[in-house]
Amino acid sequence: MNEKGLLTGFLASKLALALAVALFLASTLAMYEVFEREAREKELKSVLDVVAGSLRKVDSLPGKIRLERKLPSVGCLYFLVLSGDNLEDRMVKIGIYAEENFHRTVILGGGVNGGTFQIRERNPYRITLKKFDGISVELD
């Protein structure tokens, strides 16, 4: 009878240890996923920053300008959408659509792409801006 009690206690402690290891592994995987998601979010927001900064820079400089900026590389599939309409031709809406979506609006001093436009590009690597009579935007 005493041996059965020792065996049961031994097995219970091993089961508890196995459960603790499983919980530790599960929490480690969950933390890894959180850090990975934060890294992707930071990469996508850096694309937003480059696009918005480029639009503001071209808008603020006088004269005829052509500016090409390389966009940061992102480790996931995303779509970059730039849009505007005639009602508010100075407003450019920037959207990134991936697992999570991010948006930003930039108000400029003049019109962009003639007023109403929508540019949608999958994983673009470059933005080209030209300022002659107004600002024109291209994504590659």
Image (tube, rainbow, N blue to C red):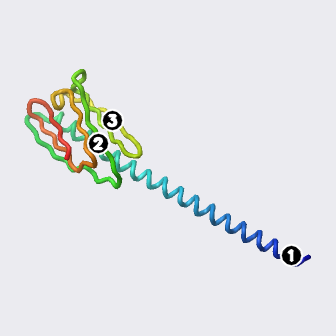
Residue sitting at x 55%, y 61%: 28
How far apart are the two marked residues, 3 and 2, measured between alpha carbons? Answer: 11 Å
Question: Residue 8 appears in which quarter of the rendering?
Answer: bottom right
Amino acid under disc 1: Lys
Asked whether 106 or 19 is in front, the reply is 19
Q: Where's residue 26, x and y in %? A: 58, 60
Q: Where's residue 44, x and y in %? A: 34, 47
- Quadrant containing the N terminus is bottom right
Residue sitting at x 22%, y 41%: 54
Quick check: marks 1 and 3 in contact, CB under 8 Å? no
Q: Residues within 10 Å of mark 2 (few under 14, many from 20)?
A: many
**Is 50 left, or right, of 44 in this rendering?**
left
User: Please, is residue 6 above or below residue 28 in the view?
Assistant: below
Question: Residue 139 appears in which quarter of the rendering?
Answer: top left
Amino acid under disc 3: Arg
Q: Residues within 10 Å of mark 3 (few under 14, many from 20)?
A: some
- Mark 1, secondary structure of its residue: helix
The residue to which callout 2 is attached is: 80
User: Please, is residue 90 above or below residue 45 in the view?
Assistant: above
**Is 40 left, or right, of 30 in this rendering?**
left
The residue to which callout 3 is attached is: 104
- Mark 2, secondary structure of its residue: strand
Quick check: marks 1 and 2 in contact, CB under 8 Å? no
